[in-house]
Image: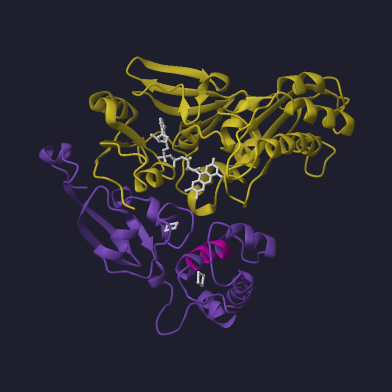
Amino acid sequence: MAIDASSRHDPTARRVVSVVVNGEPHSALVESRLLLSDFLRHELGLTGTHVGCEHGVCGACTVSIDGQIARSCTTLAVQVDGAEIRTVEGMAPGEELHPIQQAFRRQHGLQCGFCTPGFLITVEALLREIPDPSEEQIREYLSGNVCRCTGYVGIVAAVREAADLMREA
Amino acid sequence: MKPAPFVHLSAGSIDEAVALLLEHGDDVKILAGGQSLVPLMNMRLAQPAVLVDIGRTPGLDAIAVDGALRIGATARQSAVLRSPAVAAAAPLLTDALQWVSHPAIRNRGTFGGSVAHADAAAELPSALLALDAEMVARGPQGERTIPAGDFFVTYFTSALEEDEVLTEVRVPPRSPAERTGAKFLEIARRHGDFALVGVAVSLSLDAEDAIAGARVALCGVADVPLRARAAEAALVGTRAGDVAAATEAGRLAAEGLEPPSDVHASARYRVDAATTLVRRALLAASPTAPGGER
Ligand SMILES: Cc1cc2nc3c(=O)[nH]c(=O)nc-3n(C[C@H](O)[C@H](O)[C@H](O)COP(=O)(O)OP(=O)(O)OC[C@H]3O[C@@H](n4cnc5c(N)ncnc54)[C@H](O)[C@@H]3O)c2cc1C
Ligand code: FES
Ligand code: FES
């Protein structure tokens, strides 16, 4: 993190933050107060990560930081200098959707899609930890992600289907 | 909702963190995991001029057992939850952490941050009270330890001085031969929310399963976590898992409580919840309960 002596006491001073996002290195000159969510959306143009509540409650902004899911709206860009970030844009390997995305599509795990990026990243972590989760485990793991459309039934069904798809693969 | 501008300084060591706190005086705050502080800054409820970031400070996130269980302040909540050493030495903490927010927040939120933040509805402070833990703080005058019973002062206020860093939490050892029981239970609006009422129970038992010592601590019922001392005294000598004794302890624990009423629950509801939760936690903590044997 580049920081010279004169900028040490200036709250509006900018500094370089470098991260690897979905395998690609990026650097940007940012204020310390810039949230990771805004860094991704405004500095890097990666608008797949959505912003709902901006205080950690809704889960729409969930991304993965060094392999661990986290809220990008309650994380400062300067806190993750040097980290590897994964966002929803990194999920589909090419033209084809990721199995979790396919399952969400088939099982009506989304309607408006606002909450979806956060759910997808969270479900990816869930299935890594628990490859064959029970409905109770799914609901508990996803309790920090809010969806105002689906009523969650389709989401739970999508996770079950994705679990089957991924274990077969 | 964006934070107001501030200066962000990364502390390379605990001593540097203390020095930076001293240098920046009034308007400086420690940043650990940021899972309480950043939301407050987003809402402009907090507008510190300087943040001293200890999130990556070396030597602050270790989990070790050398007699006592020692948990470094910046150990992430998820790391403590997954730690086999913690599950063996203090299963009550593992139990309590399952109620603390959600995986995405526990991955960044620190153990010490939750203690220092001193939220009256947070789970860890009451669990640490029931475990008779000590907090280790480092300031300009050096290190001191603060018993859990003296650490929580009132809503969002701990005994830490402005220029002190919480470095470690110590849980006293128990002998391997000791038979114990532990349980954390709470009622919340939704899994992962702060407790409306939570209860932490830690029991030590004699060879005949009679309770030799009991610690019962409640959160969400006052400005600080509270020990239910009358209930603890009444439990000594009773058999673990005795329904009548657990019910009486629940009644005693709720006696004299004056919990807050807010949008989430009335005071009356919290009193009833405390009565019931204490009984349930005591029964679940007994070694004869499913999963109760430690
Ligand atoms: C949606 C949501 C739900 C949550 N649910 C719960 C819940 O159910 N139960 C619960 O307990 N918590 C909950 N939390 C809070 C979460 O556990 C926080 O991680 C925790 O309260 C603070 O830890 P932190 O490391 O993130 O600290 P920070 O946010 O970085 O700091 C919090 C405060 O503590 C001070 N501080 C931090 N570390 C130190 C230190 N080592 N020495 C001195 N001062 C220090 C900071 O200056 C600041 O004032 C929730 C948070 C969110 C966003
Ligand atoms: S926008 Fe980050 S949790 Fe809601
Ligand atoms: S699909 Fe609309 S909020 Fe979830």
Q: Colour of chain B?
A: yellow
Left or right position of A12 against B98: left
Instruction: Look at the picture and state if B163 lies above or below A36.
Output: above
Residue closest to the eye, B267 or A154:
B267
Colour pattern? by chain
Q: Which residues are magenta?
A: A120-127
Q: Is residue B139 visible?
A: yes
Q: Position of residue B16 (x, y in %)?
A: 28, 28
Report which quarter residue B171 is drawn in.
Answer: top right
Judge whether residue B22 is colored magenta. no
Q: Residue at x 73, y 29 (%)?
A: B254
Q: Position of residue B282 (x, y in %)?
A: 78, 34
Q: Position of residue A152 (x, y in %)?
A: 61, 69
Q: Main secondary structure of the magenta part?
A: helix
Left or right position of A9 against B210: left
Instruction: Look at the picture and state if A40 lies above or below B120.
Output: below
Report which quarter residue B272 is drawn in.
Answer: top right
Outermost residue on the left side: it is A6
Report which quarter residue B58 is drawn in.
Answer: top left
Outermost residue on the bottom side: it is A95
Q: Position of residue B274 (x, y in %)?
A: 72, 35
Q: Is residue B178 visible?
A: no
Q: Colour of chain A?
A: purple
Residue closest to the eye, A92 or B220:
B220
Q: Residue at x 27, y 48 (%)?
A: A33
